Image: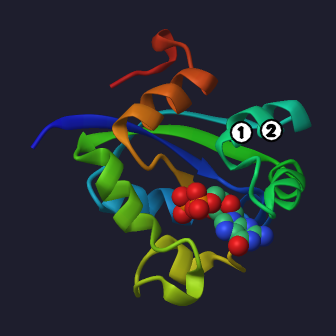
């Protein structure tokens, strides 16, 4: 097993319902360490750049509108196989398909307002972490 870092975002549907602590508990109970965290209001330009990979998809504009509809909490998680482990803790994109006990099964409102983002590969994790954090902000 190798120690990895991954980017997590608690999305506006969850920050609006005061779920940051409950979501963090699920992350920590899974053995992931939150080594950086901040609450931000994304601008449209930040959200468009972050989700650039999805810009040809039909839901892109709705996704950007949703991601700027309230505060987000961006965080860096560290642990053994953190990228995959966090994806497991999150559950499937569509909460109807998510496993019992996952964040999305328990908290997500819809396929769009699905409470959390998590990097889907180590390479994307590195890029996404550097989008939001400087190295000195990552404290093990
Ligand atoms: P993820 O890696 O599980 O977050 O899923 P994707 O990378 O496929 O999609 C990114 C985000 O776009 C999701 O987390 C949702 O917030 C949103 N999304 C994905 N599929 C749909 C869709 O069919 N409709 C809408 N409105 N939003 C979607």
> In percent of the image, x 58 and y 82: which residue is there?
95
Q: Is residue 112 visible?
A: no
- Is 81 located above or below residue 36 in the figure? below
Q: Which quadrant of the picture is home to ligand 1?
A: bottom right
The residue at the point 69 percent across, 36 percent down is 50
Q: Position of residue 26 (x, y in %)?
A: 42, 65
Judge left or right: residue 132 versus residue 112. Answer: left
Question: Image point 80% across, 38% down: which residue?
Answer: 48
Most distant residue in the left direction? 1
Dividing the picture into quadrants, the one containing residue 20 is bottom right
The residue beneath circle 1 is 52
Contact between labelled residues 2 and 1, with CB atoms less than 8 Å apart = yes
Q: Position of residue 58 (x, y in %)?
A: 81, 63
Residue matched to label 2? 48
Q: Is residue 118 left or right of residue 62?
A: left
Residue 65 image point, x, y percent: 90, 54
Q: Quadrant of the N terminus?
A: top left
Does mark 1's beta carbon lie closer than 8 Å to ligand 1?
Answer: no
Q: Secondary structure at mark 2?
A: helix
Whether disc 2's CB lies below 8 Å from ligand 1 is answered: no
Disc 1 element: helix
């Amino acid at each position: 097993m190798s120690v990895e870092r991954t980017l997590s975002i608690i999305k506006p549907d969850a920050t609006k319902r005061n779920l940051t602590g409950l979501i963090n508990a699920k992350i920590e109970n899974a053995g992931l360490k939150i080594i950086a965290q901040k609450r931000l209001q994304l601008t449209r330009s930040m959200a468009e750049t972050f989700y650039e990979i999805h810009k040809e998809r039909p839901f892109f504009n709705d996704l950007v509108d949703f991601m700027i509809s309230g505060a987000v909490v961006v965080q860096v998680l560290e642990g053994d196989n953190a990228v995959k482990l966090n994806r497991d803790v999150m559950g499937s994109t569509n909460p109807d398909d998510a496993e019992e006990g996952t964040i999305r099964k328990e908290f997500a409102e819809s396929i769009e307002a699905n409470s959390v983002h998590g990097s889907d590969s180590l390479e994307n994790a590195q890029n996404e972490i550097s989008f939001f954090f400087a190295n000195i902000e990552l404290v093990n």
